[in-house]
Image: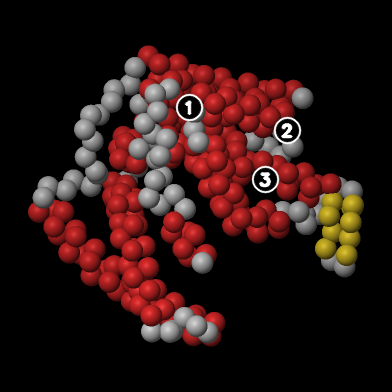
């Protein structure tokens, strides 16, 4: 079940809000990517306890979500799934030493410093996940890959990301076919057998993927594959893109200064 969730969450419609016509969508993909990266790095590098800074960042992000008319239900659902896996790491930050001890049981203790770190890291993770999922929701995957290439990301890494997006549906289809075949042969009835069967299916899927990927790559090269999916039109940056980056920098710098003064 967990594997199916991981494979299905946003795998087939990552960019379902990319066709809207808003000020955010009028920006070229490279500008959107730069704004998102600036927001993520500024949020992650903010010192612990800068609550006013994160409040201002959250307000700016909320305004951006409203302007872009993103589907909030889909965005929150994706962030919730990702936070489930991050919660294990976040919980470990609670038991940090230092400050006043609020609760103690044996060697475990909750202190004011631990609560501050937990709250800070949780807010950072939430804001960063919201921004990156928002970027993927509102930007088509081919345009986003071209933006990564324009920002000088290694071409091999961009090609790997493009292949993952293109063929994730094929992998899901293969896995579902193998699962139906195992169910039809009554191999999924007992939990003890389920672990063994699923392990064998994953191994067989890896072998099939390796063989098929080599054939697909040779076919793509014979058809002029250059490492990136084609775009109908390559957009050019305008004056609005410069203003957007300036506005993002102003928001981030203003939030940091406000938090430092506060």
How many neighbours does mark 3 have within 10 angstroms: few (below 14), some (14-19), or many (20 or more)?
some
Residue 6 against residue 63 in the figure, above or below = below
| Residue at x-position 71% and y-position 56% | 91
Query: Could you tell me how far apart the alpha carbons at marks 2 and 3 are, in whole angstroms?
Result: 12 Å
How many neighbours does mark 1 have within 10 angstroms: few (below 14), some (14-19), or many (20 or more)?
some
| Residue at x-position 46% and y-position 22% | 245
Residue on which the image places disc 1: 68
Q: Position of residue 62 (x, y in %)?
A: 59, 29
Kindly tell me whether residue 258 is visible in this rendering. yes
Residue on which the image places disc 2: 51
Report the coloring of the rendering: secondary structure
Decide which of tag 1 and tag 2 comes sooner along the chain: 2
Q: Position of residue 165 (x, y in %)?
A: 34, 51
Kindly tell me whether residue 148 is visible in this rendering. no
- Tag 2's secondary structure? helix
Residue 57 against residue 184 in the figure, above or below = above
Q: Nearer the viewer, residue 155 or 139?
A: 139
Residue on which the image places disc 3: 122
Q: Work out which quarter of the rendered image holds the C terminus and state it.
A: top right
Query: Could you tell me how far apart the alpha carbons at marks 3 and 1 are, in whole angstroms?
Result: 25 Å
Residue 123 against residue 258 in the figure, above or below = below
- Tag 1's secondary structure? helix
| Residue at x-position 38% and y-position 50% | 12
Question: Which numbered dot is residue 28?
Answer: none
For discs 1 and 2, the disc positioned in front in the rendered view: 1
Residue 177 against residue 88 in the figure, above or below = below
């Amino acid at each position: 079940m967990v594997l199916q969730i991981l494979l299905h969450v946003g795998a087939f419609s990552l960019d379902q809000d990319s066709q809207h016509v808003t000020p955010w969508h009028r920006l070229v993909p490279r500008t959107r990517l730069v704004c998102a990266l600036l927001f993520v790095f500024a949020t992650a590098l903010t010192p612990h306890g800068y609550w006013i800074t994160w409040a201002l960042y959250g307000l700016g992000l909320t305004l951006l979500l409203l302007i872009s008319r993103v589907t909030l239900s889909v965005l929150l659902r994706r962030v919730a799934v990702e936070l489930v896996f991050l919660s294990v790491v976040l919980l470990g930050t609670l038991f940090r030493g230092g400050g006043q001890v609020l609760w103690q049981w044996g060697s475990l203790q909750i202190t004011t410093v631990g609560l501050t770190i937990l709250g800070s890291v949780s807010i950072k993770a939430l804001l960063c996940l919201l921004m990156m999922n928002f970027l993927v929701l509102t930007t088509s995957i081919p345009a986003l890959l071209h933006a990564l290439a324009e920002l000088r990301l290694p071409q091999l890494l961009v090609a790997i990301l493009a292949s993952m997006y293109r063929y994730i549906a094929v992998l899901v289809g293969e896995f579902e076919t193998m699962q139906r075949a195992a169910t039809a042969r009554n191999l999924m009835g007992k939990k003890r057998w389920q672990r063994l069967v699923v392990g064998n299916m994953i191994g067989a899927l890896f072998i099939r993927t390796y063989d098929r990927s080599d054939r697909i790559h040779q076919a793509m090269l014979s058809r002029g594959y250059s490492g990136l999916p084609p775009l109908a039109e390559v957009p050019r940056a305008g004056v609005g893109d410069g203003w957007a980056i300036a506005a993002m920098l102003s928001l981030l710098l203003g939030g940091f200064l406000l938090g430092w003064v506060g």
